[in-house]
Image (tube, rainbow, N blue to C red):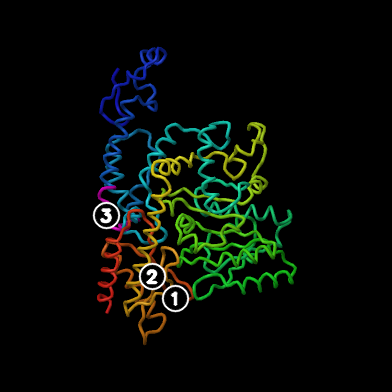
């Protein structure tokens, strides 16, 4: 029988999926009776048309503009619409997406994207997501899909071993570092504080990601219970300030319960002295959490592991595969030293759910996180690791460390610039060096410098303000970024320095 691609005049053959019942149904109801049930030809055609666009998009990424958000308000206004009652041709929708909507954005998948914390989105993960979404299996409860749940459990166990945690450890894949940090705060609260927890105090750095303070707020703590302690000249939390704050809070009758260190801050890529923090946490009975969302997967490399010495002593660690493993956005993880702590913090029974697993080898992820309904996240990690092995990722991360170090060396030789944060991992920060200018004038000129670099559309840099100074950041983390793009970055910085004279 003949049918059409949804919203299209293209015919497709619907006869291949015919069982006796399906044939009788179509004879009585017609080929368009169930338009959401696509036949093999229609499915193949949908994927082919999308793939043609995707391949062309990825192929041209190096030449595409780095940012094209001007006019975004007008575009958003044009796209507002009520719920459509009738469909449109599929090909027209693809043209709209790839021709107008997708280009009007920051080009986060470009090799020149050195802003914020890049990831890149390897294509293998997109294919894995297509498989996961198409088969649509549920893995929140082990019994529903034992094999797929085990694949995800394997991924978590790989991360546990990478963090240096014992066999009793475990964790879950999350939507990102913010959710992982929230779960860590809730778990620490449940493990270290009584039900009336409002005397509990959390300690972190003035360089910590904002999701730490947000997690404390969402976990029920007032903002006054979060201590953002000062950082040193290397932007690392001052251990002496931590010890003084804990002692002061105890004298005031408060209950210190949690310490959050950073393994790669967003501002400057700083890695706290994790071993020293672990000593304080152990002595004071604090839950020690390390936010390694950006830096954690550099543990795959020798240089990264040396710089994060002490992370294995943490009680929990946030790792973001959508950063250091180059996966699509929406892939984070929380790894804990004691998996039962996660269970105690998150498990709730319900009559409609099967009994929780008692076998320690089997995991019900719904018992370890706030989520019951969730997607199959593990496949997008498992598939590329099984295809290539960890060595490919290790080599790519080693390359990023080297590229950042080389870039820092070149920038350090420019008399107009001051490298205030040499890369501890693959992120560095610098500012203008202009004697005779006030701080405000220098910062304003630094913003002009960054804007001039970005206007050339070959790289995208971002800025931050820390210790009262405007800094320009460069984060090298996309799997597509190689030495040629670093040379472009240097050329554009030199050109911009001349332009703002």
Q: In which quarter of the image is the C terminus?
A: bottom left
Q: Position of residue 215 (x, y in %)?
A: 58, 57
Q: Which mark is residue 62?
A: 3
Q: Which mark is residue 172?
A: none
Residue at 25 percent of width and 28 percent of height: 10
Q: Position of residue 94 (x, y in %)?
A: 29, 40
**Dot 2 alpha-carbon crowd within 10 angstroms: few under 14, some 14 to 19, many 20 or more:** many
Residue at 25 percent of width and 76 percent of height: 498
**Span highlighted in magenta in the image:** 58-72
In the rendered view, would you say 120 is above or below 266? above
In the rendered view, would you say 437 is above or below 73? below
**Magenta region, main secondary structure:** loop
Q: Position of residue 422 (x, y in %)?
A: 42, 71
What is the secondary structure assignment of the residue under circle 2? strand
- The answer to which of 318 and 189 lies nearer the viewer is 318
What is the secondary structure assignment of the residue under circle 1? strand
Residue at 50 percent of width and 63 percent of height: 306
Answer with mark 1 or mark 3, whichever residue precedes in sequence: 3
- The answer to which of 139 and 179 lies nearer the viewer is 139
Answer with mark 3 or mark 2, whichever residue precedes in sequence: 3
Q: Residue 472 carries which label?
A: 2
Between the residue at mark 1 and the residue at mark 3, the CA separation in whole angstroms equals 32 Å
* Picture quadrant where residue 417 is located: bottom left
Using the rendered image of the protein, determine whether residue 70 is visible from the camera's viewpoint: no
In the rendered view, would you say 119 is above or below 446? above
Residue topped by disc 1: 469
| Residue 60 part of the magenta segment | yes
């Amino acid at each position: 029988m003949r049918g059409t691609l949804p919203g299209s005049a293209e015919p497709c053959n619907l006869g291949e999926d015919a069982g006796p019942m399906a044939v009788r149904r179509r004879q009585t109801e017609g080929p368009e009776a169930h338009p959401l049930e696509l036949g093999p030809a229609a499915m193949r055609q949908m994927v082919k048309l999308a793939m043609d666009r995707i391949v062309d998009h990825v192929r041209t990424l190096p030449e595409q503009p780095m940012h094209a958000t001007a006019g975004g308000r007008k575009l958003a206004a044009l796209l507002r619409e009520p719920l459509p009652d009738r469909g449109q041709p599929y090909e027209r929708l693809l043209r709209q997406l790839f021709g107008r909507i997708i280009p009007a954005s920051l080009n986060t998948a470009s090799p020149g994207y050195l802003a914020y914390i890049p990831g890149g989105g390897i294509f293998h993960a997109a294919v894995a997501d297509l498989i996961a979404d198409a088969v649509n299996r549920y893995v929140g409860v082990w019994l529903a899909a034992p094999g797929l749940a085990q694949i995800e459990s394997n991924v978590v166990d790989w991360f546990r071993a990478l963090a240096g945690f014992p066999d009793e450890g475990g964790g879950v894949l999350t939507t990102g570092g913010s959710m992982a940090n929230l779960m860590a705060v809730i778990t620490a609260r449940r493990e270290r504080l009584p039900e009336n927890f409002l005397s509990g105090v959390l300690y972190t750095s003035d360089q910590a990601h904002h999701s730490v303070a947000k997690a404390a707020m969402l976990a029920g703590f007032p903002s006054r219970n979060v201590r953002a302690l000062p950082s040193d000249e290397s932007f690392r939390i001052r251990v002496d300030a931590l010890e003084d704050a804990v002692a002061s809070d105890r004298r005031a009758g408060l209950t210190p319960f949690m310490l959050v260190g950073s393994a790669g801050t967003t501002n400057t890529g700083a890695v706290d002295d994790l071993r020293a923090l672990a000593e304080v946490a152990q002595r004071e009975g604090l839950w020690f959490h390390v936010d390694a969302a950006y830096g954690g997967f550099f543990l795959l490399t020798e240089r990264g592991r040396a710089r994060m010495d002490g992370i294995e002593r943490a009680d929990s660690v946030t790792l973001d595969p959508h950063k250091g493993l180059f996966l699509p956005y929406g892939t984070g993880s929380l790894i804990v030293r004691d998996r039962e702590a996660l269970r105690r913090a998150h498990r709730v029974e319900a009559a409609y759910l099967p009994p929780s697993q008692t076998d320690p080898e089997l995991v019900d992820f719904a018992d370890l996180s706030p989520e019951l309904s969730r997607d199959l996240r593990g496949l997008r990690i498992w598939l590329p690791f099984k295809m290539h092995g960890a060595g490919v990722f290790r080599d790519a991360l080693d390359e990023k460390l080297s590229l950042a170090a080389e870039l820092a060396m070149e920038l350090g030789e420019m008399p107009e610039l001051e490298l205030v944060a040499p890369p501890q991992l693959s992120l560095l920060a610098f500012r203008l060096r202009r004697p005779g200018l006030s701080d405000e004038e220098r910062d304003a000129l630094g913003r002009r410098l960054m804007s001039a670099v970005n206007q050339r559309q070959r790289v995208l840099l971002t800025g931050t303000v820390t210790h009262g100074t405007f800094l320009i950041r460069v984060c090298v983390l996309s799997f597509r970024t190689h030495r040629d793009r670093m040379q472009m970055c240097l050329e554009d910085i030199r050109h911009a320095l001349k332009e703002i004279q």
